[in-house]
Image (cartoon, grey):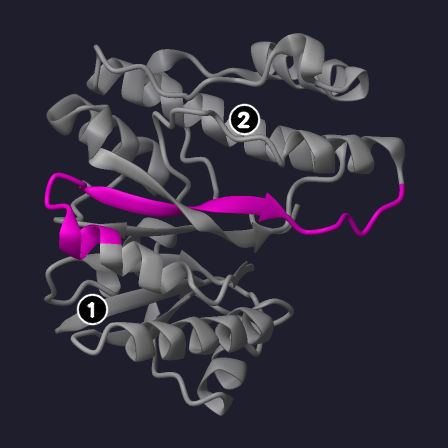
């Protein structure tokens, strides 16, 4: 049973080597524990202008090119299989993650999307905000109502052209069509680089809000979001930074009939 694994990468030369090393370990573990599986990785280079492709090919991974953003790169990586796995190029994958995702998808046909826990990597900055954000980003809702696009397994991936945030759109569609039971979070983690500055927070926040508002107009009835951490358990400095992000977004928010295309931002 061949399971396509698509890794989308845009100028990720600094991160993709570590990611692919962890992916190779996770694939070997999955093959050893589920002999029916054959995970087939493919790196899709999204308008890359650095050495991402050289690094991936040097590690023995097949690469193809794409243009037009992350979702178009995912579309380029689509192949036949009972389900597909999509991954960003700037994460680190736990060794048992792929085996757990495949086990859920094979055993539970009612699950449409399986995704792992995610933990932030230790902050590179030593500022109070970076440390507080590291704590803040370790929290996840008890009952997920959306999933992270950093790594997920999905049945029947389909996104219309023009949508840029795969996880936001797909979370809404899955919730609308199949209910909360169609999302399943597995216990082993991936690690990601969380924002560590106000600028990084705002890049993430504005993309999230703008995309969610666009989808509010096209997919009413299913609200995007999970259970936010209790405000009293959120570090005070993070609360202040979020207020600044909200205030700036209120000033810069486009009119509903003039939403711009919001670029993906991985360098936070």
Which quadrant, please, contains the C terminus?
top right
Q: Is residue 106 above or below residue 158?
A: below
**Helix, strand or loop status at disc 1:** strand
Mark 1 lies on residue: 3
Question: Percent from the top left, x then y, of residue 95?
Answer: 48, 67
Q: Is residue 101 left or right of residue 89?
A: left
**Does any portion of residue 259 appear in the rendered image?**
no
Q: Are the residues flagged by discs 1 and 2 in contact, CB closer than 8 Å?
A: no
At x 36%, y 13%, the residue is: 256
Q: Earlier in the sequence, mark 1 or mark 2?
A: 1
Residue visible at 36% across and 63% down in the picture: 98
Instruction: Report the side of 268 relative to 78 (left or right).
Output: right
Q: Nearer the viewer, residue 33 or 98?
A: 33
Q: CA distance from mark 1 to mark 2?
A: 34 Å
Q: Which residue is mark 2?
A: 206
Viewer-closest of 108 and 12: 108
Kindly identify the residue that appears in the image at 72 percent across and 38 percent down: 134
What residue span does the magenta drawing correspond to? 104-126
Q: Secondary structure at mark 2?
A: helix
Residue 143 belongs to magenta span: no
* Picture residue at 12% right of the left edge, 73% below the top: 1
């Amino acid at each position: 049973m061949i399971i396509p694994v698509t890794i989308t990468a845009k100028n990720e030369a600094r991160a993709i080597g570590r990611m692919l090393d962890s992916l190779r370990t996770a694939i070997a573990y999955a093959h050893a524990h589920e002999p029916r599986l054959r995970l087939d990785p493919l790196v899709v280079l999204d308008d890359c202008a650095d050495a991402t492709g050289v690094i991936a090919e040097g590690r023995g991974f097949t690469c193809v090119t794409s243009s037009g953003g992350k979702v178009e790169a995912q579309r380029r990586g689509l192949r036949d299989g009972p389900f597909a796995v999509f991954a960003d190029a700037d994460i680190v994958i736990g060794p048992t993650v792929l085996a757990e995702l495949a086990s859920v998808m094979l055993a539970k046909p009612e699950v449409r999307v399986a995704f792992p826990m995610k933990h932030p990597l230790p902050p590179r900055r030593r500022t109070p905000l970076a440390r507080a954000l590291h704590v803040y980003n370790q929290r996840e809702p008890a009952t997920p109502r959306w999933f992270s696009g950093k790594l997920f397994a999905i049945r029947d991936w389909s996104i219309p052209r023009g949508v840029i945030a795969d996880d936001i759109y797909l979370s809404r569609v899955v919730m609308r069509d199949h209910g909360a039971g169609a999302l399943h979070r597995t216990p082993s983690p991936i690690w990601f680089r969380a924002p560590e500055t106000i600028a990084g927070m705002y890049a993430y926040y504005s993309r999230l809000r703008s995309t969610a508002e666009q989808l509010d107009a096209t997919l009413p009835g299913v609200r995007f979001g999970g259970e936010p951490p209790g405000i009293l358990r959120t570090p005070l400095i993070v609360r202040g930074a979020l207020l600044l992000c909200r205030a700036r977004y209120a000033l810069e928010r486009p009119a509903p009939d003039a939403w711009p295309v919001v670029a993906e931002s991985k360098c936070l």
